Image (spheres, helix red, strand yellow):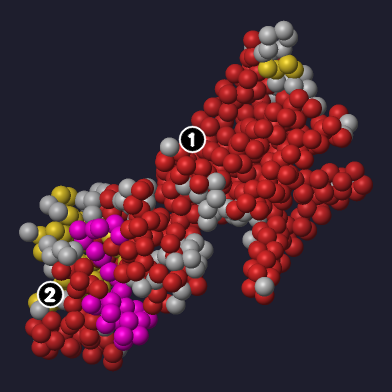
């Protein structure tokens, strides 16, 4: 019991902003609002919100690797693509009956994790860090994009699943939950919304516990001073690899959810633009905090979509500008800077009273 | 019993012979100071002992076992601990969290925070526990790192210029702490320039010069040795 209460106490800690009754009341209000929201909206808009939510997993994973661990991975989209394509190949071959789509999700995530384990082993045990880590991970995702883009011919098929080159794969079944009296098919609508929202809450809270635990302490210690962390007896390579694999699985989860949401995946999901965007979301919000990353990612995604509708290709230029502005004005991230400002405001008010 | 021994230790960087056949032996329970002019090879020897550099040839023994091939973190786990010259702390983390990170695997979870409180008091940092480590004064940072180093309960504590940048009062207090730790059974190897500090703590002094052991003995022997004075003066004139 004592161990369990210690476990949940880790929901708060020095590594995460937000603590105490005020924060958690706010959290529950937002969650209740998110639960009620589909009742006041139409199916298309709810589906669009699901689309935003699917990306947040990748952003949270990048926050863990980069914001907490200090290793900039520029290639999270590689794992997004690996998991997305794996889901496609598996479900196109074996269908959706007997809950197989859920098995396919698990297998796809395991494949992404193994890929991250292999790549991460050579990166971290080879003591590659800093800008070189970014270059290698970016190269990996670009190579995967190039490779998948040339798989147009009929010889590029795995079982029944054609890879289809630059056009990508499509028509894989959406997530399906087996249920007595008829399977529940999670079309990109209200049902998928609740599943993704539930996953998001689980992942967010789980990561909060993780970063405030002993593992999180070591991870941020490595970011601050890797030599000192090693000289406390920690094999820092294992911690870096661990964070990298968790981040890759989360990117893979984004990939799987995205693929089942739109029932397609293309090589461009691993391309240069796709690889750069998560860095913008995470940096603008505040990479060293999960809550800031979560809010920042949703805000930037919504703004990006609004811009795309009105200004087409200019949206990307604005994203670049936003990144530069953040780096110059609020290097820790805009949401995190705002939270700090609000915190100081609250403190000085209490001081006056 | 020798707790640390280097046998014919050599380190070359290209044509530069930075550590030249060093045989150093540390008895368990002693405070041993390593001195020498700039460029004598003190830091390199330190890094060899810690496993940050691997030697070109030679052997390092710790508690009777050959650790030459071990990685740094493995040496730490066997009972070494180090305090760096430039305070190696986690600046963006709180003081308490710095200690928690160092101590979390060495103490049971139930008593961890009591142990941290005790150490904070020992370091005179109780009032600063919630501050970011980066906001501490220079001397306090040095103390915090010493705290992290000793919290591992090492058999051998390595100190790289522990008093660099400290005021005379802080230096003296640090010396007193080293003596107290030593009285509790900790062996200490310190690189130090401050001769007052060396006199305060050292049982034995080794002088390094041009990568070689130049002289060895008690502090009085070393101070009386005219050749030692000459290499320091030579350095000053050069």
Distance in Å between CA atoms under marks 2 and 1:
50 Å
Task: Categorize mark 1 by other alpha carbons within 10 Å: few (<14), some (14-19), many (20+).
Answer: some
Q: Dot 2 corresponds to which residue?
A: B203
What element does badge 1 sit on?
helix
Residue at 65% of width from left, 33% of height from top? Answer: A199
Q: Is residue A182 left or right of residue B62?
A: right
Is B129 situated above or below A240? below
Q: Position of residue B92 (x, y in %)?
A: 51, 63
Image check: B25 left or right of A16? left
Chain for numbered disc 1: A
Please indicate whether residue B69 sits to the left or right of residue A272 in the image. left
Question: Which residue appears at 33% of the width and 52% of the height?
Answer: B111
Does dot 2 land on a helix, a strand or a loop?
loop
Depth check, front residue: A138 or B133: B133
Q: Is residue B128 something one can see in this rendering? A: yes
Task: Identify which residue is drawn at 39% across, 60% down.
Answer: B99
Q: Position of residue A205 (x, y in %)?
A: 59, 41
Instruction: Locate residue A52, reporting x and y percent.
Output: 76, 39
Q: Disc 2 or disc 1, which is closer to the eye?
A: 2
Please check the rendered image and state whether residue B156 is part of the magenta-colored stretch, yes or no: yes
Please state if A179 lies on the left or on the right of A299 as rendered.
Answer: left
Mark 2 surroundings: few (<14), some (14-19) or many (≥20) residues within 10 A: some
Residue that carries the numbered disc 1 in the rendered image: A117
Tag count: 2
Please, which chain is the residue tagged with disc 2 on?
B
Residue A225 visible to an observer of this rendering: no
Q: Residue furthest top?
A: A181
Q: Quadrant of the C terminus of chain B?
A: bottom left
């Amino acid at each position: 019991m004592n161990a369990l209460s210690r476990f949940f106490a880790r929901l708060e800690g020095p590594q995460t902003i937000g603590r105490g009754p005020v924060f958690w009341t706010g959290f529950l209000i937002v969650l209740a609002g998110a639960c009620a929201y589909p009742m006041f909206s139409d199916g298309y808009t709810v589906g669009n919100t699901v689309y935003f939510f699917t990306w947040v997993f990748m952003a949270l994973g990048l926050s863990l690797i980069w914001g907490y661990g200090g290793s900039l991975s520029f290639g999270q989209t590689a794992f997004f693509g690996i998991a997305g394509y794996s889901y496609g190949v598996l479900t196109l071959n074996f269908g959706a009956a007997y809950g197989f789509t859920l098995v396919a999700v698990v297998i796809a995530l395991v494949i992404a994790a193994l890929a991250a384990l292999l790549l991460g082993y050579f990166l971290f045990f080879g003591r590659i860090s800093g800008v070189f880590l970014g270059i290698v991970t970016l190269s990996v995702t670009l190579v995967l994009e190039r490779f998948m883009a040339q798989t147009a011919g009929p010889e590029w098929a795995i079982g029944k699943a054609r890879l289809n080159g630059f056009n990508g794969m499509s028509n894989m079944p959406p997530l399906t939950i087996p249920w007595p009296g008829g399977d529940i098919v999670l079309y990109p609508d209200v049902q998928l919304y609740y599943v993704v929202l539930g996953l998001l809450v689980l992942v967010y809270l789980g990561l909060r516990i993780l970063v405030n635990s002993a593992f999180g302490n070591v991870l941020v210690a490595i970011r601050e001073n890797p030599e000192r962390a090693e000289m406390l007896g920690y094999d820092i390579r294992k911690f870096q690899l661990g964070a990298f694999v968790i981040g890759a699985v989360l990117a893979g989860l984004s990939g799987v959810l995205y693929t089942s949401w739109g029932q397609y995946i293309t090589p461009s999901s691993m391309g240069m633009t796709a690889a750069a965007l998560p860095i913008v979301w995470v940096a603008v919000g505040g990479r060293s905090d999960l809550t800031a990353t979560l809010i920042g990612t949703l805000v930037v995604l919504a703004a990006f979509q609004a811009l795309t509708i009105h200004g087409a290709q200019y949206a990307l230029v604005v994203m670049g500008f936003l990144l530069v502005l953040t780096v110059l004005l609020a290097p820790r991230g805009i949401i995190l800077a705002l939270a700090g400002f609000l915190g100081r405001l609250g403190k000085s008010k209490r001081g006056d009273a | 019993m020798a707790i640390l021994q280097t046998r014919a230790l050599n380190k070359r960087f290209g044509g530069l012979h930075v550590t030249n056949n060093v045989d150093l032996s540390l008895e368990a329970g002693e405070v041993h100071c390593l001195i020498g002019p700039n460029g004598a090879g003190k830091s390199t020897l330190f890094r060899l002992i810690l496993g940050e550099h691997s030697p070109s040839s030679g052997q390092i023994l710790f508690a009777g076992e050959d650790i030459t091939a071990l990685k740094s973190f493995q040496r730490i786990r066997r009972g070494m601990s180090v305090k760096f010259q430039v305070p190696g702390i986690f600046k963006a983390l709180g003081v308490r969290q710095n200690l928690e990170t160092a101590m979390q695997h060495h103490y049971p979870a139930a008593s961890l925070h009591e142990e941290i409180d005790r150490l904070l008091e020992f370091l005179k940092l109780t009032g600063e526990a919630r501050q970011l480590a980066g906001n501490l004064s220079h001397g306090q940072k040095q103390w915090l790192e010493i705290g992290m180093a000793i919290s591992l309960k090492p058999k051998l504590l390595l100190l790289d210029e522990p008093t660099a940048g400290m005021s005379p009062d802080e230096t003296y207090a640090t010396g007193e702490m080293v003596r107290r730790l030593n009285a509790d059974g900790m062996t200490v190897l310190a690189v130090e320039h401050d001769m007052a500090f060396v006199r305060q703590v050292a049982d034995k002094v080794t002088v390094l010069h041009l990568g070689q052991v130049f002289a060895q003995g008690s502090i009085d022997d070393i101070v009386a040795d005219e050749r030692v004075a000459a290499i320091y003066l030579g350095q000053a004139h050069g």
